[in-house]
Amino acid sequence: MMNILAMKRRRFLQGAALAAGGALLNTRLLFAGVGTGGDSRLIVVIMRGAVDGLAAVPPYGDPAYARLRGTLAIAAPGATDGALPLDTTFGLHPQFAFLHEAFGAGELAVFHAVATPYRDRSHFDGQDVLESGVPVPHASQTGWLNRALATQPRSGAGERGVALGSNVPLMMRGPAPVASWAPTKLAELDQDTLQRIADLYSHDPMLGQRLADAQSADAMAGGQAHDAMGGAGANRYAEVIRATAGFLANEAGPRVAVFDTTGWDTHANGGGARGQLGVRFGALDTALRTLKTQLGSTWRSTAVLAVTEFGRTAAVNGTGGSDHGTGTAALLLGGAVRGGRVICDWPGLSAANLYQQRDVAPTLDIRALLKGTLVEHMGVGPGALDAVFPDSGRVKPLRDLFRA
């Protein structure tokens, strides 16, 4: 087999001009088209629990991938349950049929080896850094997206943002007024509590395995008992999607929406192409397809960011899952996106290239993606980025992520 890593190492795939150190957009582009922020819509999907980026976007062309992943490995395109091809190195999980269509239509950009500045492995500290936009956990009581909204002028009396779910996430807390909306029926078991229990049990061979078995059984019960919304069932997931589309398609409504999904902490029984992780990917894919349909003409000015707090270990563990890791994948989807590209400085999965001998080494700071989205798509002035993302001067916005 040819040495793919030798060719791919330290270069961008299909997007070299998008280097994180690139210059800011010039003024003409910033305030042209959807970049004015007036008609642009942004939806942020927080995928709580540390999504397995090597399953979501499998690097099937990396020679070390199949060996490390074991039972979690996704086969190459063309094989039974094989990856949906993006290029000669990367594919999408086979449950991501809509996302694959969107990639082919130029409406999906895929990012890999992505991470926040956080380098430990606590879900709650990692989520805090992801949502606050501050490099260290619990250093801010406000979120980067709310601070970004606060930089923009308000038109009329309505809020510019809406948080959908039982709580307003940290990302949307701060000086800018935001609306909130909750489903008519909440989950029977609070998913934050369940995730904490799973985290505590993850290193206990008996309790961890029994909890994982129960979650896996629920997830595989046709996607009805559990789905990517984390236990409320498909109807609640659909309700959140309908509400999101309703808010953003309304000309007098908010321009930014945030909701979260849970159940991504797959320490055991993750499954490869099939299994609980595949069920959740399938539910998310269906939801995003529905979102596009229900947004109608608003889709062309919409961007959807799907992000998670960190990734998972490169190697499969002893219980058929993966443990807390570092580098992961992120998705940027929508009619406003200049997609059809994998944007990645792939570090490789050989032992010498893994972070701390166990994780995908991060090569892209997620704040570069977030900054690029705010500047180019939402019209946030470059001078405001220091307040939105404190202590991040070295992280430059990615360029040309959106259609002019």
Image (tube, rainbow, N blue to C red):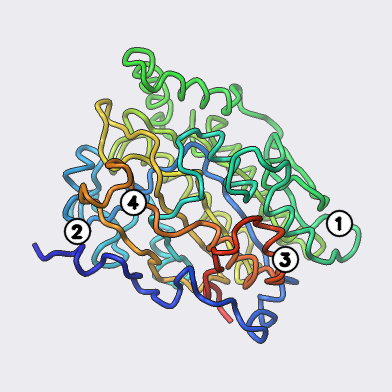
Residue type for callout 4: His
- Single out the mark in the foreground, 2 or 3: 3
Look at the numbered disc 2 and give the secondary structure of its residue: loop
Q: How far apart are marks 1 and 2 (CA)?
A: 50 Å
Q: Distance between the residues labelled 3 and 4?
A: 37 Å
Residue 378 point in image, percent of width and height: 68, 68
* Left or right of 147 on screen, residue 13: left
Q: Which of pointers 2 and 4 lies earlier in the amino acid sequence?
A: 2
Height in image: 192 above or below 44?
above
How crowded is the residue under tag 2: few (<14 C-alpha within 10 Å), some, or many (20+)?
few
Distance in Å between CA atoms under marks 4 and 1? 39 Å
- Say which residue label 4 marks: 93
Circle 4: element type: loop
Residue at image point 21% right, 59% down: 61
Instruction: Look at label 3 and name its amino acid.
Output: Ala
* Residue at x-position 38% and y-position 24%: 217
Determine the residue located farthest toward the left in the rendered image. 1
Residue placed most toward the observer, 49 or 269 = 49
The residue where tag 3 is placed is: 384
Please say if the residues under marks 2 and 4 sit with CB atoms less than 8 Å apart: no
Q: Where is residue 388 in the image (x, y as percent from the top left)?
A: 69, 58
The tag on residue 260 is none
For the image, the number of numbered tags is 4
Q: Residue at x 48, y 47 (%)?
A: 284
How crowded pointer 3 is (Cα within 10 Å; few <14, some 14-19, many 20+) is rated as: some
Picture disc at residue 78: 2
The alpha-carbon separation of the residues under discs 1 and 3 comes to 22 Å
